[in-house]
Each structure stands twice: as structure tokens, then as C-alpha cells.
Amino acid sequence: MAETFTHSTYLSPYTWRYGTDAMRRVWSLEHQRLIWRRVWVALAEAQSEAGLVTQAQIDDLRAHQHDVDIPRAHEFEAELKHDLMAEVRTYAEQCGVGGGVIHLGATSMDIEDNADVIRIREACDLVIAALSDVLRLLADRIEAHAGTVCIGFTHLQPAEPTTVGYRLAFTAQDLLADYQNLWTIRDNLQGKGLKGAVGTAASYNQLLAGHSMTARDLEARVLDKLDLKAFTVAHQTYSRRQDFNVVNGLANIALALHKFAFDLRLLQSPVFGEWAEPFGANQVGSSAMPFKRNPVNAENMDSLARLVAAFPRVMWDNAANSLLERTLDDSGNRRSVLPEAFLITDELLKRAKRLINGFNMDERAIQHNLSVYGVFAATERLLMEAVRQGGDRQHLHEVIREHSMGAWAAIHRGEPNPLVQLLVEDERLLALLDDENIRHFLNADDYVGDAPARSLEVVAAIRDVV
């Protein structure tokens, strides 16, 4: 099997464009084979305690444990049509003394499933570290802008004011939950253990017949060497439900980052104009329109996040359709879905760090939108105070609604917002509040409730955990 992976043939974008080198290393073929060999050595070491393998054989296996030879393994695979057995042959060919005991008593998934869990755990560690960085950056931004008032939007229409910090705290709160969830998933990962072809460990019981060591003892020794826990019950594979839980955990992270990126895209639109991605001095926004400053990082994040959102369904099918003791229809897609789910999440977090650390806020645009639309939100405040002064809630609601509709019409005609003046001149309101008080209660600049305090609570929660 000749290696011809150049730019003249198809390469996955995750080979070089998306993700980090560290994550690519985890999911590399070489790293996979190194972990397989680590499992085989651990198995042989445990079997030596039962007298099945000699010290000389173990020394030979250890001496060549890191001599992975992918081209040679592919030569064997071209003939055998079985990648794990091709690696067994490659390893055995290198080990003149110990080669004959490699894979003794094992089935392929005793090696592959345990190795996959080790890789998943390593990949989780990388994601957790990157997510920690994102959360710390968010905490700094939230703290800096907990009290920066801006107009809120519901249904993409101006609503009551909020703060920039509170808006970011929403994302941070979700990501903190995802961080804690991924730690739980990571700490509860379990391998298949050593249970043979259908999970009964019959081959190991036969191999150990007459020895004081049981199949369970052997499994425990190997797992200890690999720093793994194992499912009590497995078939030929561990339950693929675990893969679903892992990928679903990544999809949750993608969900929170998708919303953050989408919100940034909206706020970068000139209609809002409040936030903007960092933009390099020589960066090109459009090949046709030189004036464009497109939110390309946020758009890329949303594009990639959709893929992660789709992956849990594939993992669900793998678990639900693993018939009886095992079918092989999970194998092909796991080679793609598991590494891609991690690499995409890796890329999302990398871009999120860039955006959170560098996005620009236009204070003038924030203040402009607040001044234009904030008065509409402040009418609720005015309504509450007018009722407190003895007014009829339903009657006053209709008064304010009539003037608000007229003000919207004026804004749509390109005129300044006339709502304050309309309300100040209304005798029905003046009967309850004087001119100065009406103007006071129509100022929305501090009408944000306890948003600043709650924002800082999220900051404290992040710094307590991360």
C-alpha cells in the first residue's frame, strides 16, 4: 500500500487546516499503533506473572515497542485485509524472541477498544485545557463589562436593556456546565477490558486453566498498567453508548460556541454595529467587494459546529444497531466521526479564544442603539411607577402603546425617536407624574436589574472551578 498523501490527492481539512497539531497527534495512525503496542506489552507483562510469557520475550517486546512501521504494516494489510493483524505481523517480525506471544488470548477489540478509550481520554484532556482558556478569557471580559449597558433584543427586536457582561455570562454559564460535564465524561470513561470474542473471557479462562491467576485477575493487572477502568459487561466491544455520550458532550460545547458566534455575527452587522471580529491590516474581506469586513471566523465556527451537532446521531445509531454480541457497521464511521468531532471542537475553541480575546466593541454604537431604543424598554418602568401613583394599569398600557406605535412609525421614516416628548405631553400621564419624573423614568441607562451582580456571580463560579 503505497503512501501518496500529497496535495495532488484528497486530504481532509482536518489534516492541516482545522484543529491543532496536538489533537492531530492523538488521532494519528502512528499514535494509534503505539497505544496498541502498549496494550500488547501490558498483556504480555500480566501473562508473565502466570508463567505464560518469559522475561526475555517481554524484554524483546519492550525493546521494539516504539518501532512503529506504517509502510510495512500496510504491506501486510494489503494481503490480510485486517489492520490490527497487520500490526501484529509487523510487530512480531521485529521481535524475534517475543513475537510469538503478541496478542495471546486476545480478540481485536480487546486491543482496539481499550486503545480507543485511551485516545478519547487524551483528546478530552486537550479539549478541557482549551475550554479552560476560553472560560478564563470570558471571565475577564465579563468582569470588565458587567455594568456596560446595552440594548437587549428579543425576537431580533429591541427589548429591555441588558449589559455586555450579562450577555457574555450567558455563554460562559453554558460553557462552564459543558466543562464540568466533559470532566465527568472523561473521569468515567471505561475500556472493554479483556473479555474476548463475545465478552465472556472464555479464551483467557482456557489459557489460564491450571494457573492460580484468573481471567479477572489478568484483566485487572492489564487495566492497572493502562490506568483504565473497564465495563463489568461487554460484548465484542464496549457499549457504543459511551461513544454517544462523549460526542454529545462535544456537541454541547459546539452548541454554546455556535450561539456565541452567531450573536457576534448579528452584532457585527452595521444595523447593530456593536461588536466586531478582530480584522488584520492586510486582511481581505471579499474578493469582489474591497470594503467588506465579514465575520469570517464566527461564520466558520457556525459552519463547523453544525457538523458536530450531527455526529451524536451517528453514534446513537452505532449503539442502537450493534446487534446481539456485535456487528461491524460502527467501525468505518468511528474512524471518521471520533477524530473529526474532537478536531472540530478543538478548532472551535481555538477560534473562540481568538474572538473573545480580540473582538472590538463600538461604545458609540452601543450608546446610540440604547438611546434610540432604550426609551421603548423604559416605558415598562414608567408604567410601573404610574400605577404605583394610583393609575389604572390597563388604561395606561394602552396610552403608552398608542404613543409607542407612533414613535416606531417616525423612526421608520428616518426621524428622531419622539416617544419621550409624546409621553411628557400626555395629560393622562401628567395627572400622575410631573414632567421631570416622566423623563427620569424613561431613561433606560440603569434599567438592568441585577444583571451586573449576576454576571459577576458567573465570573466567581468560573474562577472557583477553572
Image (cartoon, rainbow, N blue to C red):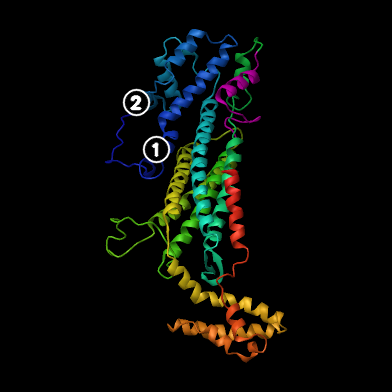
Q: Are the residues tagged 2 and 1 within 8 Å (C-beta)?
A: no
Instruction: Name which quarter of the figure residue 105 lies in.
Output: top right
Residue 217 painted magenta: yes
Element marked by disc 2: helix
Structural crowding at the residue carrying mark 2, measured as other residues with C-alpha within 10 Å and reported as few (<14), some (14–19) or many (≥20): few
Give the numbered dot on residue 21.
1
Disc 2: which residue: 71
Return the x and y of residue 178 as percentages of the image width and height: 57, 47
Element marked by disc 1: helix
Residue 34 visible at all? yes
Return the x and y of residue 450 as percentages of the image width and height: 63, 63
Structural crowding at the residue carrying mark 1, measured as other residues with C-alpha within 10 Å and reported as few (<14), some (14–19) or many (≥20): few
Q: Residue at the location (47% across, 59% down)?
A: 262
Quarter placement of the C terminus: top right
Q: Residue at the location (57% across, 37% down)?
A: 186
- Range of magenta residues: 213-240
Return the x and y of residue 242 as percentages of the image width and height: 59, 38
Q: What amino acid does circle 2 point to?
A: Pro
Q: Residue furthest right?
A: 390
